Amino acid sequence: MTTLLPDTAQLLAFISAGLALNIIPGQDMLYVIVQSSHGSRRRGLLSALAIGCGTLFHIAAVSLGLAGLLAAVPLAYSVVRIAGAIYLVWQGIAMWRTGGQPDEGSPGHAGQSSGRGMFLQGMLTNMLNPKVALFFLALLPQFCDPVRGSMGLQLALLGLIFCVNGTLVLLAVSLATHSTSRRFGGSNTGQRWLKRIGGCVLAMLGLRLLLQRGQ
């Protein structure tokens, strides 16, 4: 299995490039920051892990050759992009409207359901962003070589490395954001405004995605 990976120098270059890209604020990081800035620490961590799981979906699509459809069929790309944009705007509006209300349900089944809902929300936010799949489609093949064996497995392994590193970055961002927000927005009024600002950020991300043209 290790022969599927590039040599040490190339692998280190890939990891370094991946980490550099992961620390640049983008839609996923902004989403985690918004979710971590209000509610419990659990909310932010779940969001970061959910984004990581959503990324695995895109990696699988690239490994199986499905992501190429988004690049080859503009209509498919547009449908996914518009669906993702609408979902982000809907999340933003919902967050604004619930400003000041508790984030977590009562212990027991309600809390578990809330956790599942937050996780699914984060996954869908990532999965409905077609630019993630196109990003992997452009990056991963540069570090693959047919001589080393199955291209699909090489893409999957490199994608998994990128995903793990990216998830660790998001988890760190989540913890840092939560700690900072507790310090500066611990009051009910502060939490209410953090929610509303977060709702605006999500809605603007959705509008930005909706207004983007082309790939």
Image (cartoon, rainbow, N blue to C red):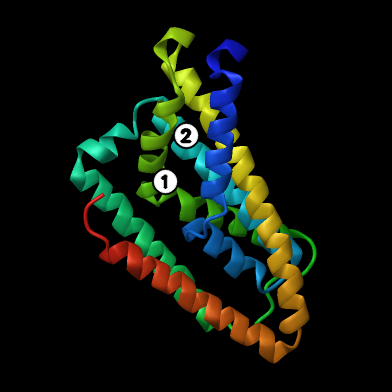
Amino acid type, callout 1: Val
On the question of residue 100 being in view, the answer is: no
Q: Which residue is mark 1?
A: 132
Is 21 rendered above or below residue 10?
below
Determine the residue positioned at 52% across, 82% down: 97
Rendered image quadrant of residue 41: bottom right
Residue that lies at the very extreme toward the bottom in this rendered image = 189
Is 78 rendered above or below residue 198?
above
Q: Earlier in the sequence, mark 2 or mark 1?
A: 2
| Spatial CA span between label 2 and label 1 | 9 Å
Is 209 rendered above or below residue 192?
above
Which mark, residue 59?
2
On the image, the x and y values in percent for residue 196 come to 54, 82
Instruction: Say which of 110 and 194 sits in front.
Output: 194
Instruction: Say which of 71 and 18 sits in front.
Output: 18
On the image, the x and y values in percent for residue 13 come to 55, 32
Amino acid type, callout 2: Ile
Determine the residue positioned at 50% across, 76% down: 199
**Is 122 positioned to the left or the right of 147 in the image?**
right
User: Which type of secondary structure does the marked residue at label 2 adopt?
Assistant: helix
User: Which type of secondary structure does the marked residue at label 1 adopt?
Assistant: helix
